[in-house]
Image (cartoon, grey):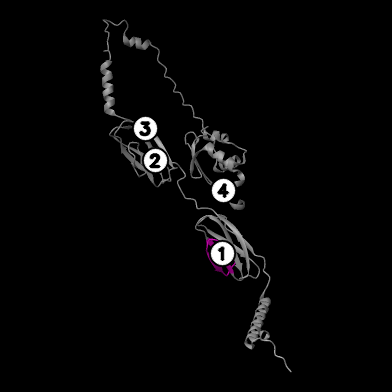
Amino acid sequence: MNKKLPTFFRIDDQVFFSMAGLSIFALLILAFRYATHHECSPIKLQVVTDNLIAENNITFKAESTGATSYYWDFGDSVTKNEQTYSTNHIYKKGGHYWVRVLVNGECSEFTDVVIDEKHVNVSPLLPMIAGPDTAYLHEAVTYTDTSPNSTVWDWRFGETSGTDGVNRKATYTYLTPGSKKILLEINSNPNLTNEKIIIVIDRQAQKKITAKLNQENPRPPKVILLHEKPQEEPLIKQQQAEPVKPKEEEQPKAKPRAPDISVELFKSMLYEVADGTKRASDFSSYLCNNLSMEISFDNKVVTFTKMCEELKKLGKKKIKDFPSIIIQPNPETNCIKTITVSIKRKGFLGL
């Protein structure tokens, strides 16, 4: 006599066949993945571009054996699919980014890049104010900026609180006499500012003072003595007198000139300053001992000595390059009168 199984041991036929079907399907998928799976080949991920600067076109390469598709994630929410191992990308702003490439949809590799901010191009030279050192009351006087790369000007002539001129050449009429300071800012950059001190003279007041002095101290009249008969004939006396020898004109002494220095030698000496083997005083002969002159360093106005101190503090190992150095000597003395230095620091991992 057959015994019936308890109810809780019984399995419904539909449930049994469903579970069996799912098991077979899972085994088929596992078998397919096992048959199609292959080991990942090494991926050589490279950043080809040297200047990693925002808004520059940067090239990446991912070399791998048997690769046919590349999925790129540039770390700034931008992705791209490529069929070749090379791709380009432009970062809109500087920062530290992780770049990932997925090869054939299975194998991936990472690298990090440090993108520098784009430098704003400004005039590398301070403005140079050309014009007279003396002006006259109620008479127009003109001053000109002779710096080569100026595009925007803000002239202030020291009598008002606002701008008095917005062109390369500015004309102004003073209403009060005395010492005045002319200020000029170029390219809307407060670090590119120069000044000139002038004297404003009141012609009428000067004439009144001169007339008053003449009244108080009149000149004595000239007295001419007449002789009845000259003791010697003037012509004979003139013939007997020895001829006066003309004085030899003294040749002006040549002004001492500073030695020449090239941009490459100047850059090399700056590296030595950062390395601690040279000091600011080693530039004395080229600057005519004016080590406290103001220069443009990394878009800041500092003294030459201060720049050398900052380079030594930074150290040569942290300096990647000096991408722009401009030195301008005085035509008469050859002393360097303007200096502009831009510096590029090494980024993450010394890159």
Q: Which mark is residue 345?
A: 4
The x and y percentages for residue 3 are 72, 91
Looking at the image, residue 328 sits to the left or right of residue 233; the answer is right
Residue identifier under label 2: 184
Under mark 2, the amino acid is Leu
Q: Are marks 2 and 3 in contact (CB under 8 Å)?
A: no
Viewer-nearest of discs 3 and 1 = 1
Look at the image and tell me in which quarter the N terminus lies: bottom right
Q: Which mark is residue 198?
A: 3
Disc 1 versus disc 4: distance between alpha carbons? Answer: 27 Å
Relative to 101, is 134 on the left or the right? left
Checking the image for residue 73, the label placed there is 1
Q: Hey, what amino acid is under mark 1? A: Asp
Which element is circle 4 on? strand
**Mark 4 or mark 3: whose residue is earlier in sequence:** 3
Q: Amino acid at mark 4?
A: Arg
**Amino acid under label 3?**
Ile
Mark 3 or 1, nearer chain start:
1
Distance CA(mark 2)–CA(mark 4): 31 Å
